[in-house]
Amino acid sequence: MSIVSRCRTWWKAITRPERLNGEIEDELAFHLASYVDDLIRSGASPDEALRRARAELGALDAQRENCRAAFGTRIWDELSADTRFGLRMLARQPAFTVIAIISLALGIGANTTIFTITRQVLLERLDVYQPEALRLFAWTGGENRVPVRIWGHWNETDHTCTSFSYPVYQQLRHQNRVFEDVFAFKVISQLTVSVHDQPEPVTAELVSGNLYSALGVNPVLGRGIQDLDDGAPGTGAIALISDGFWSRHFGRSPDVIGRIIQVNLTPVTIIGVNPREFTGASSVQVSPDVFLPFSMEPVVAPNDAKSLLTNPEQWWVLVMGRIKPGVSDASARAAMDVLLNSAVRSTMTVDEGHSVPHFALHDGSRGEDLNGEKYSKPIWVLMALAGIVLLLACANLANLLLARAVSRQRELSVRIAMGATRGRIMRQMLTESLLLSVAGGMGGLLLGYAGRNVIPHLMLSSWETELIPMRFDWMIFGFTAAVSLCTGLLFGFMPAWQAMHTQINRRLKENVHSATQSSSNLSSKVLIAGQIALSMVLLVEAGLFIQTLANLRKIHLGFRPDNLVLFEIEAPNTRYPAPKDIALYRQIERRLASAPGIRSVSLSKNPLIAGNVSNDDFVPDGLPLHRNAPSYVDDNVVGENFFATMGIPILAGRSFDNTDTETSRLIAVVNQRLMKEYFPNINPIGRTFLSNKRHFEIVGVSGDARYADLRDDPPATFFTLYRQQTRSEPSMTFEITAGVDPAALVPGLRDAVAEVDKDLPLLNIRTQSAQISDRTRQERIFASLTTGFGLLALILACIGIYGVMAYSVSRRTNEIGIRLALGAEPGRVLRMVLGAAWCLTVTGVLLGLAGALGTGRLIASMLYGLMPHDPSTLIGAALLLMFVALLASWIPARRAASIDPMRALRNE
Amino acid sequence: MTAEQPDLFKGTLDMMVLKAVSLGPLHGYGILLRIEQISGNRLQIQQGSLYPALYRLEHEGWIESEWGQSEKNRKAKYYRLTAAGRRRLHAEKEKWNHMTDAIGAILRATGEEV
């Protein structure tokens, strides 16, 4: 067939050019020989015959070329010639080439890195059968919706929630007609699982009995969870484990099936191992370790009262369905809304003024997608930053190429005069740009590969081990390749376009130095001003974020974070039902206090500066209710040494001590802020207040300390003693001060806790300082990235200014020579060149100022202690840019001023 | 090329080459000779354009080539028509006949007929 023969001949011409040329020569030689024979036979002399034969055939080289070209190699040959020529041109200007490739590699590398994250966090779908047909169930409800307790994610902005009660889920599942199957799941973090008697915190996913079949997931070993496993609450002590868990604990041994592990101290049999790609229904990034049927809820998520599986008030289950083909989302939503309404009314009593929430459908192809929601804003900001840097690199290269193209005008004119078409010239120029961008792209790919885990590291707490693994595959490669090509076209187009419009006659007549190129010069100037403006925006933002960080670091915490080690202990409800949990904490506190190297031990319900806060009602006895005072204030449940350990001063009265026990009278310490708000001009010591139906006596006033977050002023807070707590506390944070290095302390802490209960793991071990810097993670990411990108932009802008000024000076050598010859002072020439650079810089800075003010509103909420239009930051960035710009134009200006008039005039 | 030789239509060289090799495998020089011989020496092929045309026809898959020995024991490249080339030749012939008929009709036309 024609296509086959075309490819075959083309391939032959491309891959074996020597052989093809040899064949052509042989063939032509045969032709000549035969023709010469015939001519001689008809009477010509041998010399004459050879001459005629050669003349009639034409030049052998041309014949060879034409024959080769008949195999369709013209474009290829031109391309490879262009490439070779381009490589030679680039090799001739190594400095330019290196700068271009490095700036492109940085720009493309930044984009590749961020695309890796974007893809994983925002784009990837669940690796299950037809994820696009999955829908996540949700509901919306306003202020007066039926009151339910939500354990899950509540979206404040659009009042939607994806949690349902288990009874409602069951009705939705059994009555639905629009979904092929409806299944449920719930991720529960920090269960304690013991394998080989080693306790370890794990993440579990409760799944309904039909989840495996509905998602089409086949375990690599054993079987999936089935409806039979998901029976009455408390039954079904079976589990599937993730690929990671299988590797970590069982070395991928196939006889893991039938093994028994302890989940929250309950024996559970392993019946299967999930495929590596399956990450559960909730997240596309990380798989929970253990999968259990919902019937195990009483074991893994114990609740004080009754099982959540029968509780209609607790909404906690995530529900998904696979929509039937041909059913639209709108009609499915309408049908499910009716079902939800009847399900809610049949499981709960709906009062007069309350409304039933409305059903909503979310895309389920990415699971619950909490990460997507959480990280989408920072990721978009990062993408925008990386995009800006790449644009800067492009603008810069376009500029350098423009300047170079002008100096190549003569060469191009000659080529056009000799018959090169304009399209051909443009192709040649674009080939050179693409060579640069492809080299830059390769560098960028390497950078992106090396940096693929940097940003996920920045985004996670330092003690969190659950790193999202970043995959690097053909899709990333494709993205980088596409970006490189687009970049090459972007920065190469303008110079190529300009080269194409070279006027032959004018260029050949005029000499290069006097050729005025006002249009290209204008575009260079616009590019430079744009670059300066972008650098200005980045520098201002870097300045704002750095100052925000500094302000946050300077904050008066109200407590002493040095040498403090924190960790959590969870008391499994099955082994430590209230009040045994309090006794356990007391035992651990006393055991730790006697461990070597430990100075002070305390514990609290909420660690400080961790984003956690609890509050309770607060009604002082014997005082008129202050109308404006809130009846709820923050509180914390702490150990007796809390204030001493945390370094919070006691301003009046006393702290807790070991005479305060479970049975002594109820006491509390309030902070200064609470005293000012509730007891103005009254001594609070000895007064009582009512909270949670119990009366507490205030025995002391403490200093104010920041509670949940660095940015919030210390709230009015009261502290109660954990030993006097009657509610159960599923977990407590221990705070330890030690004289030694915190890392050296950890084994001792583990041993001490193991002596109390060997099945209790220490969770989230970290220092208080790490905890604090974790709260400023986002600010640090932005500060380091804007600074890095800002500096890069500054360097690129400098190169741009230098390039344009140097080019303009070399182009005006003649003119400047005349000026000097006519008596202009060198200082005046210097000022003239600097003035031109100054004009550019000021324009760019003013544009950048407008840009910075515009973007300021977007980042205002991330700043602390300064406004987005902070004058000193704006002025500082402007001054820095102007200084650097003048510095960059100083060298060309000096060169202009030191031009020797005689030589300049003789120059042409 | 002699002065009195008629100009060839574009594409007729391809057709003549296909026709020449359709009668049996030939080397390039042989094709040249055969065309001149069949045409009774009324047509001479410009030698310079023959070989690029052969390569183009091979590229299109209408002829295929093979190295062999010439009558004088020289190494020569022989071309033969492929099945696709045979179809192509047929189509070209149809087109050519159609066109010459039409042109002939125009040239034969007299005043009364118009």
Image (tube, coloured by chain):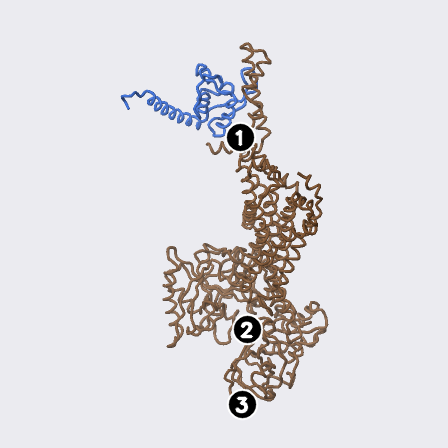
Chain colours: A brown, B blue
Instruction: Look at label 2 and name its amino acid.
Output: Thr
Q: Nearer the viewer, residue A30 or A697?
A: A30
Asked if badge 2 and badge 3 are on a common chain, one would say yes
Position in image of residue A379 (x %, y %): 55, 59
Q: Which mark is residue A69?
A: 1
Evaluate if marks 1 and 3 touch, with contact meaning CB atoms under 8 Å apart: no
Please state, as top left, top right, bottom left or bottom right, where the C terminus of chain A lies in the image. Answer: top right
The extreme front residue here reads: A822
Amino acid identity at mark 3: Gly
The three-letter code of the residue at mark 1 reads Ala
Do discs 1 and 3 belong to a common subunit? yes
Instruction: Determine which quarter of the picture holds residue A180.
Output: bottom left
Q: Nearer the viewer, residue A491 or A253?
A: A491
User: In this picture, is A27 found above or below A473?
Assistant: above
Residue A720 image point, x, y percent = 59, 81
> How crowded is the residue under tag 3: few (<14 C-alpha within 10 Å), some, or many (20+)?
few
The residue pinned by badge 3 equals A622
**x and y, in percent, of residue A50 in the image:** 58, 16
Q: Could you say which disc has been placed on residue A574 in the image?
A: 2
**A765 and A141: which one is in front?**
A141
The picture quadrant where one finds residue A666 is bottom right
Q: Earlier in the sequence, mark 2 or mark 1?
A: 1
Residue sitting at the far top: A43
